[in-house]
Image (cartoon, rainbow, N blue to C red):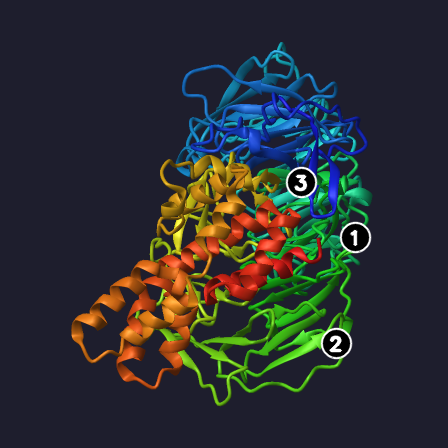
């Protein structure tokens, strides 16, 4: 696996910053992004379907043990310095430097039909690797008959040693890496030197009594003896060199043994069908008292002879004292998967855990992750938030949240979303504008937690907002919360200030826009409603009904698919998810602009839509799957223009996508990938390459097709005479002429009324201001009716005047010169309603710059 280390300049809202590929303290050599191809992370990057790699600015979050597919098996060398790994979908073995997380060698084993490998262990010199070769990659093929043998770690040659049938776990390697022990197809215990040149030497033939399964064979700590379980109540113990007779240790009435471990010289721990028991390795005498003991599975012997495993009854990791077989104060392994492959290093000081596309290393004594910059991201992120200055990022996925220093590409903190967070992940997340606080909510335990973004520590301690869920964060460092039982909404200063008086709301989920103007309420199996808190006596307006719908389970409750909604920064747009992404325009009345897209009804993944800072774009990852690439398709970033609800472009990011977010200045797009990394893209370059079109610029500005309209924006930005053109085209018509035509709308003569209406229609947006006034204030019913009819195609949600205003102001704002600002000021004073409103919002955004 080749790895390209780059350092690039990324211009975020705070200026230029050096963003390396994080690899600990190693040197990073800068290269020219103009000519360089982005380096692969795991599998080689596929070709982009539209935008080209030139738009990639940086990639970070890369782990040192990154794989192109989910990790299947892991094994340490006897000295603990080398880690061997395999994946579920390729006949490849990778060798890693465990201290740095760097790839040492990648071995692609030749041979037609070669499938995945399960690892048994490395020899003392790490030259030979015991491995089981499967016929294919499916679960059926992984469980079917397979061959096992020794792999030369320098040449990749694989030499078969024997055959093992279904449900046979890999044989085990002695602690010093010199001897292999396993059970043959005939049920014979076999021990042989770990050397391809030495044929297997049968130590003892015990008929067909020995079963074949996981943890059925174990070496003594010194590697001089081996123990195996039988099908009954007996264990067999033998010397690895065959110099002593085989001993049979008889069990008792508790039932048969199903696994065996040898943590200390003077005791063997055997797991029965129910409890675990410690036995004397010479006499077989039971050393633990009567009564039911702990039930662990997936056990590893760790430092001090302790047993680390997963509690069979309660779940979670438990450490047992091998003397009394009772739990001891265990290390706290945060977010360690309980059902993935793992192994402890010889001596038991380091635990290596397969976690998705990566391997994470933990200090057994403390449970803390080693190489945190390399191993910090265990789950792909599907929720991303950035601070106002763009220097900090909150990414949440699975049951974990992580904060990042974006300019340096460094992991700051990793912590559970909430204490006891469920695996469905967060219902909502937020990052304070200054990047100091990370706020997360989980639906499972109905709890909102405020974390210190720099350390991950819980900031609100025992005063966590229990029974309250996060619904929003305003610009004054106040967090909006909703009570999941009453539906009341309240706000708190961060990190845990006193709550403001609660605002009664509908029972069910309730969400607040950033400015607190809009409340959105959605009750499970009921309807989606909005309420304008600034309007006197305003009630709840129903936008969408779910009554009578076959309700899919999509992991967000309640209601399953309409939450969490996303608001544009200015509160004008609302994005919801219900059988597709829906965009709602709130400022001009509660009505839907368009249903943006649809996906399969039974999806269990609600994408988190993200708005650009100016509210002109909304992006989401569609058609992705958390289990990609083994069970799903890579997610595609899709971007829509909010003014039209039309798709601007879609972006197949190399390696797929699980989430995305705009940087605070809107010029960059951060994409989260299934391999837990993040990439930063030049958003303007992506969009410009996708929306190129030819034709008259003025006509294209009014197009309902985002690709056509945004191409006109690019054309204006590139045109030195754009400001002159726009000033002329948006100049209001002569006031006297417009007043005369409006008076004609109420003339007694029908032909005069028709002629006046045609003339005003020809003026279009140049007469919009006067028409808006007359439609609202004229005492003549005929004038009000005709003025309103004229305004429909001009300033309606998809009217030409509104679309031209939105796009013309966008082009002027992006030009950003003093002359451009002067033009925006003119439009605020003299432009039509849509143009004045858009220009005022643009000036407010330009002011801080």
Q: For residue 463, which numbered disc appears in the image?
A: 2
Cα distance in 3D space between marks 3 and 1? 42 Å
Lateral position of residue 793 relative to residue 720, left or right:
left
Could you say where residue 16 lies in the image, as x and y percent from the top left? 74, 39
**Image-quadrant location for residue 484:** bottom right
Q: Quick one: which residue is furthest to the bottom in this view?
A: 537
Cα distance in 3D space between marks 2 and 1? 40 Å
The answer to whether the residues at label 3 and label 1 have Cβ atoms under 8 Å apart is no
Circle 1: element type: loop
Image height of 500 relative to 371, above or below: below
- 158 or 808, which is in the foreground? 808
Q: For residue 323, which numbered disc appears in the image?
A: 1
Image height of 563 relative to 691, above or below: below
Mark 2, Cα crowd under 10 Å, few <14 / some 14-19 / many 20+, is: few
Q: How many marks?
A: 3
- Viewer-nearest of labels 2 and 1? 2
Mark 3, Cα crowd under 10 Å, few <14 / some 14-19 / many 20+, is: many
């Amino acid at each position: 696996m080749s790895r390209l280390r780059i350092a690039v300049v990324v211009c975020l809202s705070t200026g230029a910053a050096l963003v390396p590929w994080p690899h600990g303290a190693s040197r990073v050599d800068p290269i020219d992004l103009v000519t360089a191809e982005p380096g692969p992370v795991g599998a080689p990057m596929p070709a982009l379907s539209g935008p080209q790699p030139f738009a990639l600015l940086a990639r970070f979050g890369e782990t040192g043990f990154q794989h192109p597919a989910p990790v299947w098996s892991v094994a340490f060398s006897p000295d603990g310095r080398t880690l061997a790994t395999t994946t579920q979908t390729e006949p490849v073995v990778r060798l890693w430097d465990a201290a740095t997380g760097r790839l040492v060698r990648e071995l692609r084993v030749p041979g037609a039909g070669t499938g995945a490998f399960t690892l048994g262990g490395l020899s003392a010199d790490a030259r030979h690797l015991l491995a089981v070769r499967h016929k294919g990659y499916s679960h059926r093929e992984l469980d079917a008959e397979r061959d096992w043998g020794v792999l030369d770690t320098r040449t990749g040659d694989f030499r078969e040693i024997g055959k093992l049938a279904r449900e046979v776990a890999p044989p085990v390697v002695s602690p010093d890496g010199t001897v292999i022990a396993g059970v043959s197809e005939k049920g014979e215990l076999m021990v042989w030197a770990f050397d391809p040149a030495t044929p297997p030497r049968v130590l003892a033939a015990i008929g067909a009594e020995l079963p074949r399964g996981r943890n059925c064979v174990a070496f003594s700590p010194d590697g001089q003896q081996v123990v195996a379980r039988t099908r009954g109540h007996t264990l067999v113990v033998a010397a690895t060199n065959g110099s002593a007779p085989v001993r049979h240790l008889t069990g008792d009435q508790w039932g048969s043994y199903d696994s065996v471990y040898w943590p200390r010289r003077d005791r063997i721990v055997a797991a029965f069908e129910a409890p675990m028991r410690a036995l004397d390795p010479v006499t077989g005498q039971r050393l633990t008292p009567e009564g039911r003991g702990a039930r662990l599975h997936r056990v590893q012997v760790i430092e001090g002879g302790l047993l680390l495993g997963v509690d069979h009854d309660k779940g979670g990791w438990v450490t047992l004292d091998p003397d009394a077989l009772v739990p001891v104060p265990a290390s706290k392994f945060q977010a360690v998967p309980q059902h993935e492959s793992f192994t402890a290093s010889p001596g038991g000081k380091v635990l290596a855990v397969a976690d998705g596309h990566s391997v994470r290393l933990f200090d057994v004594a403390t449970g803390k992750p080693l190489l945190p910059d390399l191993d910090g991201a265990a789950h792909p992120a599907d929720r991303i938030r950035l601070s106002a200055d763009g220097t900090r990022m909150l990414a949440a996925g699975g049951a974990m949240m992580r904060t990042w220093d974006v300019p340096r590409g460094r992991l700051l903190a990793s912590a559970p979303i909430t204490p006891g967070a469920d695996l469905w992940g967060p219902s909502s997340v937020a990052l304070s504008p200054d990047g100091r606080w990370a706020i997360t909510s989980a639906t499972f335990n109905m709890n909102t937690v405020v974390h210190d973004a720099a350390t991950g520590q819980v900031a609100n301690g025992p005063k966590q907002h229990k029974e309250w869920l996060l619904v929003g964060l305003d610009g004054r460092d106040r967090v909006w919360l909703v009570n999941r039982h009453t539906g009341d909404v309240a706000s708190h200063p961060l990190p845990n200030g006193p709550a403001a008086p609660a605002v009664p709301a509908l029972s069910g989920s309730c969400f607040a826009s950033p400015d607190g103007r809009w409340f959105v309420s959605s009750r499970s199996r009921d309807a989606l409603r909005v309420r304008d808190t600034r309007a006197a006596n305003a009630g709840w307006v129903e936008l969408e009904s779910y009554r009578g719908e076959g309700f899919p389970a999509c992991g967000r409750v309640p209601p399953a698919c309409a939450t969490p909604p996303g608001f544009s920064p200015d509160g004008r747009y609302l994005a919801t998810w219900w059988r597709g992404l829906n965009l709602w325009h709130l400022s001009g009345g509660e009505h839907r602009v368009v249903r943006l897209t649809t996906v399969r009804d039974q999806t269990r993944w609600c994408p988190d839509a993200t708005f650009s800072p100016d509210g002109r774009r909304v992006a989401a990852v569609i058609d992705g799957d958390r289990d990609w690439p083994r069970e799903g398709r890579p997610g595609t970033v899709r971007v829509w223009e909010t003014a039209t609800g039309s798709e601007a472009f879609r972006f197949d990011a190399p390696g797929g996508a699980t989430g995305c977010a705009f940087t605070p200045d809107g010029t960059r797009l951060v994409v989260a990938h299934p391999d837990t990394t993040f990439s930063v893209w030049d958003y303007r370059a992506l969009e410009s390459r996708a929306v190129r079109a030819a034709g008259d610029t003025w006509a294209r500005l009014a197009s309902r097709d985002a690709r056509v309209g945004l191409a006109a924006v690019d054309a204006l930005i590139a045109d030195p005479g754009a400001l002159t053109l726009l000033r002329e085209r948006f100049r209001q018509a002569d006031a006297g002429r417009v007043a005369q035509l409006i008076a004609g709308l109420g003339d007694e003569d029908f032909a005069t009324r028709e002629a006046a209406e045609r003339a005003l229609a020809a003026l279009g947006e140049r007469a919009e201001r006067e028409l808006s006034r007359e439609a609202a204030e004229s005492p003549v019913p005929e004038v009000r009716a005709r003025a309103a009819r004229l305004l429909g195609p001009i300033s309606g949600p998809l009217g030409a005047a509104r679309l031209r205003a939105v796009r013309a102001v966008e082009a002027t704002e992006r030009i950003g010169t003093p002359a451009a600002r002067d033009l925006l000021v003119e439009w605020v004073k003299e432009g039509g309603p849509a143009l004045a409103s858009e220009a005022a919002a643009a000036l407010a955004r330009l002011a801080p710059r």
